[in-house]
Image: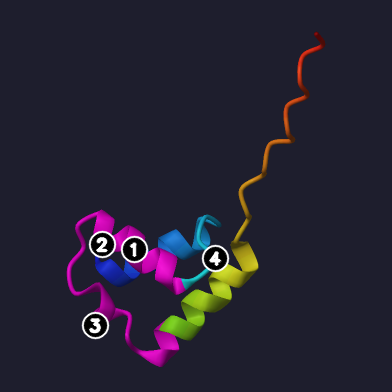
């Protein structure tokens, strides 16, 4: 899968709140030239818009109650 196509798939996944997170994930997956390929303002803006529309923050678990003594 090409780098830019994967970036769009990651943005649509709802797991990333911004392009920086997508870049980090792409690099972790072994994609090369990530910064250069996502440098165009139009691509960054589109990815940011997708992230803003789809991002779902991880749910925090409620604190555990201490067991009774």
For marks 1 and 4 on the same chain, the one whose residue lies earlier in the sequence? 4
Please determine whether, in this image, residue 17 is positioned above or below residue 44.
above
Query: Which of disc 3 and disc 1 is earlier in sequence?
Result: 1
Is 64 on the left or on the right of 1, as rendered? right
> In screen coordinates, is 56 left or right of 68?
left
The foreground one among 9 and 67 is 67
Q: CA distance from mark 1 to mark 4?
A: 12 Å
Dot 4 or dot 3: first in sequence order is 4
* Stretch in magenta: 19-43
The residue carrying pointer 3 sits among few (fewer than 14), some (14 to 19) or many (20 or more) residues within 10 Å by Cα, namely few
| Quarter of the image that includes the C terminus | top right
Q: Which residue is mark 2?
A: 27
Quarter-wise, where is residue 63 in the image? top right
Label 1–label 2 contact, CB within 8 A: yes
Residue to which mark 4 is pinned: 17
Q: Which disc, if any, is residue 24?
A: 1
Q: Which of 20/1 is in front? A: 20
Residue 32 on the magenta segment: yes
Q: Which residue is mark 3?
A: 36
């Amino acid at each position: 899968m090409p780098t830019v196509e994967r970036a769009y798939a990651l943005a649509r996944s709802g797991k990333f709140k911004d392009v920086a997170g997508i870049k980090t994930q792409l690099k972790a997956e072994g994609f090369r030239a990530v910064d250069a390929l996502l440098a165009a303002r139009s691509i960054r803006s589109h990815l940011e818009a997708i992230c803003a529309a789809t991002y779902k923050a991880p749910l925090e678990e409620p604190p555990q109650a201490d067991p009774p003594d």
